Image: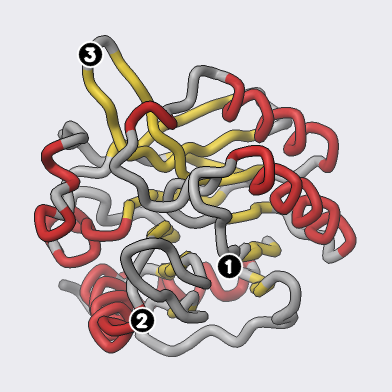
């Protein structure tokens, strides 16, 4: 399966501008024969505490339309409102089965006062696409290994994030650790550019179940990786032989 990371630099709280960028990346993904396209945390707004930017349904519909137009499944970040609470979500959409799945970030970033605006989720989520089982997470979740143990057995972890450049060593170290301890592929999907608070870098990366860095088959404008059936079979054999 060809999986692509869209390492975008979102325009701050500007959904219209960001939608133009996202649509173009869907087009580029089709040219690269991508099957699953991954976007970072709060894709259309940046990591904002402005909950009025929540998705009223139009953002999800926008991603659905692009996924169906180009025949590419997608994972993206958005703010979800449920009753009187707001959630920092990673959303998956499969254009072939018309399936939508939300994961709500469980560990909120108190250092950035995220807990004052958002409600934490309370469970892991999984989705299956083209025979591969994925489990998504959001940014600060990465620092809590117990969350990933909840999803142990998944083939691929996806962490969408707004992880600052100044803590890039933590990012790479923790992604690699989550891959090794769970014997699972992991994709770290980070934004780039800057926002009113901090600066980001091109930190997106993927590791295999052994902690080796996966080599992208293309880097611009998307980082494209190919997870083959043989690679998955090697992972299953490793799990069976090196028991944890």
Residue 65 position within the rendered picture, expressed as x and y whole percent measured from the top left: 75, 29
Q: Secondary structure at mark 3?
A: loop
| Quadrant holding the N terminus | bottom right
Image disc number at residue 7: 1
Q: Residues within 10 Å of mark 3 (few under 14, many from 20)?
A: few
Q: Residue at x 58, y 27 (%)?
A: 60
Q: Residue at x 54, y 18 (%)?
A: 57
Image disc number at residue 84: 3
Nearer to us in this view, 232 or 185:
185
Q: Residues within 10 Å of mark 2 (few under 14, many from 20)?
A: some
Residue 164 position within the rendered picture, expressed as x and y whole percent measured from the top left: 33, 74
| Quadrant holding the C terminus | bottom left
Mark-to-mark CA distance, 1 and 3: 32 Å
Which of the two discs, 3 and 2, labels the residue nearer the N terminus?
3
Image disc number at residue 165: 2
> Where, by quadrant of the figure, is residue 70 drawn?
top right
Q: Secondary structure at mark 2?
A: helix
> Where, by quadrant of the figure, is residue 5 drawn?
bottom right
Mark-to-mark CA distance, 3 and 2: 33 Å
Q: Residue at x 31, y 75 (%)?
A: 175
């Amino acid at each position: 399966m060809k999986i692509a990371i869209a390492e975008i630099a979102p325009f701050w709280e500007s959904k219209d501008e960001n939608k133009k960028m996202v649509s173009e990346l869907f087009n580029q993904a089709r040219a690269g024969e991508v099957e699953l396209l991954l976007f970072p945390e709060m894709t259309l707004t940046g990591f904002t505490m402005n909950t009025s930017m929540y998705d009223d349904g139009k953002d999800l519909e926008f991603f659905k339309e692009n996924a169906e137009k180009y025949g590419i499944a997608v994972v993206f970040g958005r703010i979800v409102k449920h009753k009187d609470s707001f959630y920092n979500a990673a959303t998956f959409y499969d254009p072939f089965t018309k399936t939508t799945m939300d994961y709500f970030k469980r560990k909120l970033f108190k250092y950035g006062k995220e807990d004052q605006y958002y409600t934490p989720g309370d469970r892991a989520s999984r989705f299956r696409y083209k025979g591969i089982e994925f489990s998504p997470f959001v940014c600060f979740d990465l620092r809590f290994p117990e969350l990933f143990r909840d999803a142990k057995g998944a083939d691929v972890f996806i962490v969408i994030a707004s992880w600052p450049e100044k803590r890039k060593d933590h990012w790479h170290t923790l992604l690699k650790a989550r891959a090794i301890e769970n014997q699972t592929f992991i994709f770290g999907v980070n934004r780039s550019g800057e926002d009113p608070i901090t600066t980001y870098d091109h930190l997106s990366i993927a590791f295999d179940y052994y902690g080796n860095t996966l080599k992208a088959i293309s880097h611009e404008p998307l980082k494209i990786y190919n997870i083959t059936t043989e690679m998955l079979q090697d992972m299953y054999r490793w799990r069976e032989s090196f028991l944890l």
